[in-house]
Amino acid sequence: PPTKPAQDAFSSLVIPGDIVKEAYECKSVKDVTQRLAKYIEKDDTKSALRLAVQCRTKKGGPLKNFASRHVVVPKKDYTLDELEKKNINTTSFITPIDDTLDDIRLGGSVAAFSGIVALSLAFHWGIGQGVFCLLGIFGLSAYDTIKNGAGGSLLIVDSIGRLLYQKYRRRVAVHEAGHVMVSYLMGVLPVEYTLSAYDSYKKGGESAGLRAAQQAGTRFADEIFKKEISSGEIKARSLDQFTCISLAGIAAELVVLDKAEGGRSDLIQLDALLFALRFSPQRASFQVRWAVYNTMTLLRKHKPILEELADLMEEGRPVKDLIELLEERIPPPPPEEFNADGHVANKAMYADE
């Protein structure tokens, strides 16, 4: 078996000799995912990424879908009218509104106010005592916002939503499934996911406290992107990956549920990146509109598998099971460069490919 370090053209990573040898020994998808699981369990995401890269089909390995460019629409400036004609609701990518959690927050506020009024009537409180209680509630909320980034209130509201609303639980799973599918197919390895604020709080540890509570999230082996960010030079491929992955949660909700409620934090992160890169409004719009079309096209093509992926995530299955599903259920991309819809398949888009 080969044991010399290898340079990977796709990722620009140097693959150590021991991982080159390990990849050579992987004869099936399960061989790869079992080894990936061991690296992920040790939080060695760097080795996990290098093994996945080395096990791609183009390198002679069994992973035919990792970084496979399954569906890539031509990179050009799409107008909003063009996207609307493709039945893409662009409004959801501008202002997604989380109706479920907003309703729970409103209900909680009404209940708190009603409770104070009821106590005031029952115990014959004066106006001052009622105002004092209201100020106490506002004070706790302000403290949580400043100290915990509103993690405490999110933990409560998200837990109520998951307990009372099955549709909410499903929406969160579909949203994160979109991130997982798009990241994997575009060559960014998912290593962990959470579907509730309580899970993210537990995984954050005591040092992070309630600030670790997030509605849901997916973590990736993204060292390549982080290195490029720190160097101040981001490759076109990395920018395309980040943009599509950021929008994948909203796109998945639209594809499966016909409505998107989550994704505000994803859009904030994407806006912050494009601002940091000093993109003009025109250039940022070009990048985002292309990514919207690209991501929606990819997820629509694999909608049944996206729903299966969300099912596994709702069951709490490990990442290795998600990768096995994507490898087993999605056929390899077609050999032709363009299909009937004009989508590019297996065509090099970047100079270093």
Image (spheres, helix red, strand yellow):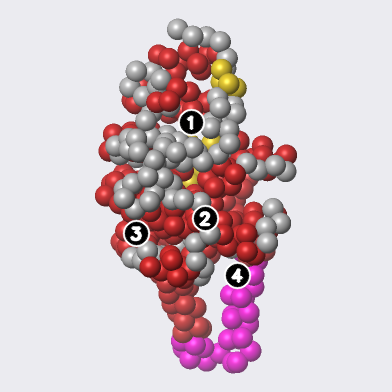
Q: CA distance from mark 2 to mark 1?
A: 37 Å
Sequence-first disc among 4 and 2: 2
Q: Residue at x 62, y 41 (%)?
A: 235
Mark drawn on residue 164: none
> Callout 4: 10 Å neighbours few (<14), some, many (20+)?
some
Residue 195 in picture, x, y percent from top left: 42, 51
Q: CA distance from mark 3 to mark 4?
A: 36 Å
Q: Observer-nearest residue: 210 or 308?
A: 308
Sequence-first disc among 1 and 4: 1
* Mark 1 vs mark 4: in front: 1
Q: Could you say whether the residue bearing mark 2 is in a helix, strand or loop? A: loop
Query: Does the image show residue 171?
Result: no
Q: Residue at x 40, y 22 (%)?
A: 61
Q: Main secondary structure of the magenta part?
A: helix
Q: Which residue does the numbered mark 3 point to in the structure image?
A: 255
Residue 161 in picture, x, y percent from top left: 39, 64
Q: CA distance from mark 3 to mark 2?
A: 23 Å
Q: CA distance from mark 1 to mark 4?
A: 37 Å
- What residue span does the magenta drawing correspond to? 117-144
Name the kind of residue labelled 3 in the image.
Answer: Val
Sequence-first disc among 3 and 4: 4
